[in-house]
Image (tube, rainbow, N blue to C red):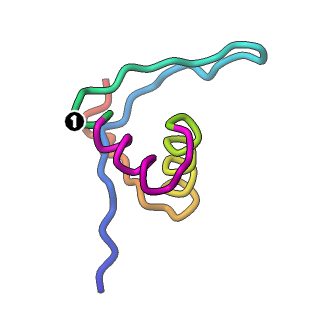
Amino acid sequence: MEEQKIILPAKALQHLQPGQSGMLRLKPKTYNALVDLANESGMALSHLASEIIIQAIDKNLIQFDRSTRK
């Protein structure tokens, strides 16, 4: 089975400094999908989202499309 990658447009943002915390807003469809996953796993939303992101990075599932970089 061919591995499918998540393709995202590349964009440069700044990392947080020590002591800072980040916050983001999710679209309703994304939030509801995360709630469904959290209900299945029993994990807190923030921990679940973090785990999904870290695993996607560790497993090299994300490919960046730098042709759209601004």
Q: Is residue 28 above or below residue 54?
A: above
Residue 51, relative to residue 9: is it above or below?
Answer: below
Which residue is farthest left?
A: 29
Secondary structure under the numbered disc 1 in the rendered image: helix
Looking at the image, which residue is at 72% across and 16% down?
17
The residue sitting at 37% across, 20% down in the picture is: 25
Q: Where is residue 33 shown, x and y percent of the image?
A: 30, 44
* 36 displayed left or right of 53: left
User: 16 or 9: which is nearer to us?
Assistant: 16
Q: Can you tell which quarter of the image residue 66 is in?
A: top left
Q: Where does the C terminus fall, quadrant-wise?
A: top left
Residue at the (42%, 49%) spot, across then down: 39
Q: Quadrant of residue 21?
A: top right
Foreground: 55 or 63? 55
Identify residue for label 1.
Answer: 29
Magenta region includes residue 8: no
Specify whether 27 is left or right of 62.
left
Residue furthest to the bottom in view is 1
Location of residue 46 in the rendering, given as x and y in whole percent from the top left corner: 54, 34
- Residue stretch in magenta: 32-44
Above or below: residue 30 compared with residue 37 = above
Q: Residues within 10 Å of mark 1 (few under 14, many from 20)?
A: few
Residue farthest right in this picture? 18
Question: Residue 28, position in %: x, y?
Answer: 23, 28
Residue 17 falls left or right of residue 41: right
63 up-or-down from 70: above or below:
below
Residue found at x 26% / y 39%: 67
Q: Quadrant of the N terminus?
A: bottom left
Main SS, magenta region, reads helix
What x and y, as percent, mark residue 64? 37, 47
Count of residue discs: 1
